[in-house]
Amino acid sequence: MILTKLISNFKMLDVKSLEFVLRNNEIDGLKPIKYLTYKLIIKGVEVSVKCPVFKIREDDSKEKSVFQSVGAIKEKMLRYLPSFLIPRKKYPTYVYLYAIQYYLTNNISMRKTAEHVCSKFNLRTFSHSTISRILNKLCSSYEKLINTFTNAASNDFYVSLIIRRKWDNDRLLKIQFISSIFSSILKTPEITANKLCMDYFNQNEGEFLF
């Protein structure tokens, strides 16, 4: 089981390490049994994100309550991750979502978008195919996106969205909505992405946004 927390619950320990901060390193009376370390590239610097792991005893009702809020009381382990981290992704979530929205609102190719993202976030590489894969994943999750973010959608996309010839009506409908919920990400990538990922995770039984 994985629970995410907003980036505000993390602090920079040094230029190459981020560590999760809890109240006295505890949650609801539980103490971490170990930490898992994830590698991320943030603003051109490789950092290690240390996330605590808690052991859950099924016969302890207080410890069960940790899981009841997300409907998974059978799990044995609880991992805490920051909202900017998705396992197996080497960049923070805001990098990927910024790339999607920049592509959708600028009349340039995915390859040119990837070049811009590298410049924006001081990255050595960012594959244009990543944009296509994540956009496809978001389109495949359209129903869940609708259920999660209907109230957060903005009408700004009607003006800014660049419509591509290869999109059929179904895909256009999905991409319009995706762009609408990402409408603020170009101005405030970290804040917007963290909230989107957090809200989606909490409302979809621990499923990551992409």
Image: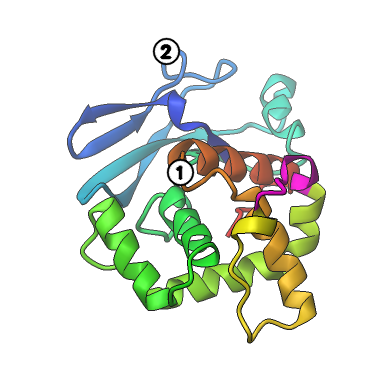
* Residue 208: percent from left, percent from top: 60, 53
* Residue 199: percent from left, percent from top: 66, 40
Residue range in magenta is: 148-156
Residue 77 shows up from this direction: no
Asked whether the residues under the numbered discs 1 and 2 touch, taking CB atoms below 8 Å apart as contact, a structural biologist would say no
191 left or right of 164?
left
44 magenta-colored: no
Residue for badge 2? 24
Question: What secondary structure is marked by label 1?
Answer: helix
Give me the residue at 58% from left, 37% from top. 195
Q: Give the vertical position of 186 relative to 123 (above or below).
A: above
Which amino acid, by three-letter code, is at mark 2?
Asn
Give me the residue at 53% from left, 32% from top. 5
Give me the residue at 42% from left, 13% from top. 24
Query: What is the CA distance from the residue labelled 1 to the residue labelled 2?
Result: 30 Å
185 left or right of 198?
left
Residue for badge 1? 189
Quarter of the image that includes the C terminus = bottom right
Residue nearest the viewer, comparing 181 with 76: 181
